Image: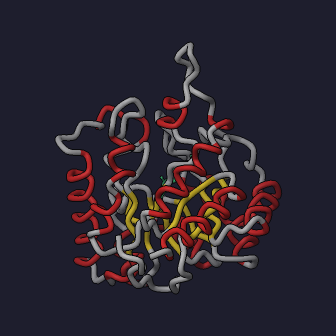
Amino acid sequence: MTSQFPELLGFPDIGRCRVMGVVNVTPDSFSDGGQWFEADKAIAHGLELFAAGADIVDVGGESTRPGALRVDPAEELRRVLPVVRELAAAGPVSIDTMRADVAEAAVRAGARLVNDVSGGLADPRMVPFVAANRLPYVVMHWRGPSVDMQTRAHYDDVVADVRREIAARIDAVLAAGGDFRQIIVDPGIGFAKRPDADHNWALLKHLDQLAALGRPVLVGASRKAFLGHLLAGPDGVPRPPAFRDHASSAITALVAAAGAWAVRVHAVVADVDAVRVAARWRAQP
Ligand code: PMM
């Protein structure tokens, strides 16, 4: 990947990979389910992430773990809005949602980036909304709802297939009148990707193929199942999510050195150092 990030509306280049800290206002996320389900706890956690050096805090009210069912839209709004409003006063906030109504309310409450794991496929009103408002918009690779997404983890060539499917979603944003410079792409680590196959590793190793689409790349690998699988003990039992942070930071260093625009992570502190190491690494001729 090149040393400069492509221009992104609303987010000037800071010369290194950004750290996006995660606040899941959900009872059931795989990584931190229930810990930040109450608004005051979620807000306190988001403020801690900013204090620890997060460049962006990503607030979500719907779990997308494999097998998860959709949350009711009114409940999703109830979960995220007070948290977005409070955190947006402290720093840049992104809203992690597949719903245009939730995105719109969150943007009104101060969110500056829309992170849609469905890449606009889940809600037909999402792409027209972000396009009309020229909002920075994460287009993640997605093949359908979490409830049975792992049944769709079939690829001829995972890197080429994911790239082609993301390119189609970029085209959808442009066809709706959107701006190329508002788009961020994301390979969707763990989404219709098998933890015991090459899928996630191939995408991470070949991020340059995704970057060749001409847009900044966001990577969300933190605590995901492929790391639990890698770090399984001699009994073959996957390492639990709470014990995957060192491996997550190692991924941060690797993808930041490879030119990722941002990493979406849970633990933040080590990742903040990792992106600085990677920036220095990249600066060295
Ligand atoms: N992963 C999760 C949720 N939102 N958003 C983006 N852009 N990329 C991701 O990989 C991603 C995401 C699921 O992880 P979590 O349950 O720990 O939030």
Q: Is residue 185 above or below residue 265?
A: below
- Residue drawn where x is 25% and y is 58% of the image: 163
Q: 241 or 124: nearer the eye? A: 241
Report if residue 83 is visible in the image: yes
Q: Quadrant of residue 119?
A: bottom left
Which quarter of the rendered picture does the C terminus lie within? bottom left
- Residue drawn where x is 65% and y is 44% of the image: 245
Q: 136 or 216: nearer the eye? A: 216
As drawn, the residue found furthest toward the front would be: 285
Report the label total: 0
**Residue 157, percent from left and from top:** 20, 44
Q: Quadrant of residue 275?
A: bottom right
- Residue drawn where x is 49% and y is 74% of the image: 284
- Residue drawn where x is 41% and y is 66% of the image: 217
Q: 73 or 113: nearer the eye? A: 113
Report if residue 68 is visible in the image: no
Residue 18 vs residue 260: left or right? right
